[in-house]
Image (spheres, helix red, strand yellow):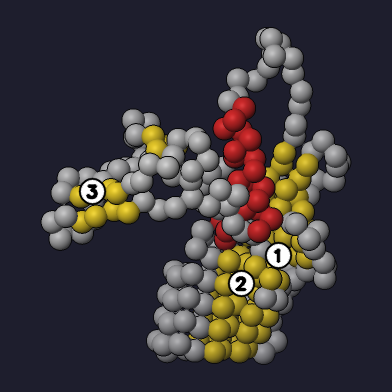
Amino acid sequence: MRRSSAPAGADSIEGDAGVTTIDGGSGNDTLLGGGGGAEIYGGAGDDVFYRAGGAGSVLYGGTGANTFIASDETLIADADTDDAVQVGTYVLTGGTRWANFSDIPYAYDGASAVRYALNTVGELVIETFAKLTTFVANYTFDIGGAATAGIRTLEVQIDAYRLLDPNRPNVPIFGWVHDLLNETHKAATGEPYYPGEDPLALDLDGDGLELTSNTTVSPFFDLDGDGFAERTARCGNDNAAHGRAA
């Protein structure tokens, strides 16, 4: 077994086909190469995994905002919401499967260049137009919330019901349309359909901002100006929020 590692600090580490372990250590590193079945560790820092490992390799980003350049038959083992996956310089943001119009079990991005699916062990499968397949372990995505590696994958099915049909799902139509537009736009572009604005929070006593948790009893506020109020956290004691009525 051959291992390439680096001392603390920003490094560029390249392993040849015989290297089975690459360890970037701390610092913002660029990690390249390594043989098939290699284990590649970014460690602490904002790392870039470029052509990292051959088929069967496992990539560990560690802490920091890491960037994984898609490599064929590699597994990203610990991606979180601050990380990103790219095909070359193209940042992947996700895709949508329109179930009413397709029997193919993939969600496609806006350019139909990348497609996504979940396998039986909960990994996100990313297939590129160049036939590269990358896997992301423990993939999660919540509507209105965060997504692993910033990749949002949706399946949308639209059904029609009569207004008085007792089997009609109890779904608030305006909230559903809001979420649909927002999430499909984020999946296609990485940006929300309703961008919203952060409220101005003021630290009145100079000891740092103190915010409450967002719970089921939190107040409602229309942060994005779309006419719908959402639950939001609020400023704690000795802090204030500034808003403007439009």
Q: Give the number of the mark in front: 2 or 1.
A: 2
Q: Which residue is rendered at x = 62% and y = 88% of the image?
A: 15
Q: Quadrant of the N terminus?
A: bottom right
Q: Earlier in the sequence, mark 3 or mark 2?
A: 2
Is 114 left or right of 243, judged from the image as shown? right
Looking at the picture, which amino acid does disc 1 mark? Thr
Q: Which residue is mark 3?
A: 240
Give the structural element (helix, strand or loop) at label 2.
strand
Label 1 and label 3: CA atoms lie apart by 46 Å
Q: Give the number of the mark in front: 1 or 3.
A: 3
Q: Can residue 56 be seen? A: no
Q: Which residue is rendered at x = 72% and y = 39% of the image?
A: 156
Give the structural element (helix, strand or loop) at label 1.
strand
Q: Quadrant of the C terminus?
A: top left
Q: Give the number of the mark in front: 3 or 2.
A: 3
The quadrant holding residue 63 is bottom left
The quadrant holding residue 8 is bottom left
Q: Which residue is rendered at x = 76% and y = 45% of the image?
A: 97
Label 2 and label 1: CA atoms lie apart by 10 Å
Q: Residues within 10 Å of mark 2 (few under 14, many from 20)?
A: many
Q: Which residue is mark 2?
A: 68
Q: Quick check: marks 1 and 3 in contact, CB under 8 Å?
A: no
Q: Which residue is mark 1?
A: 134
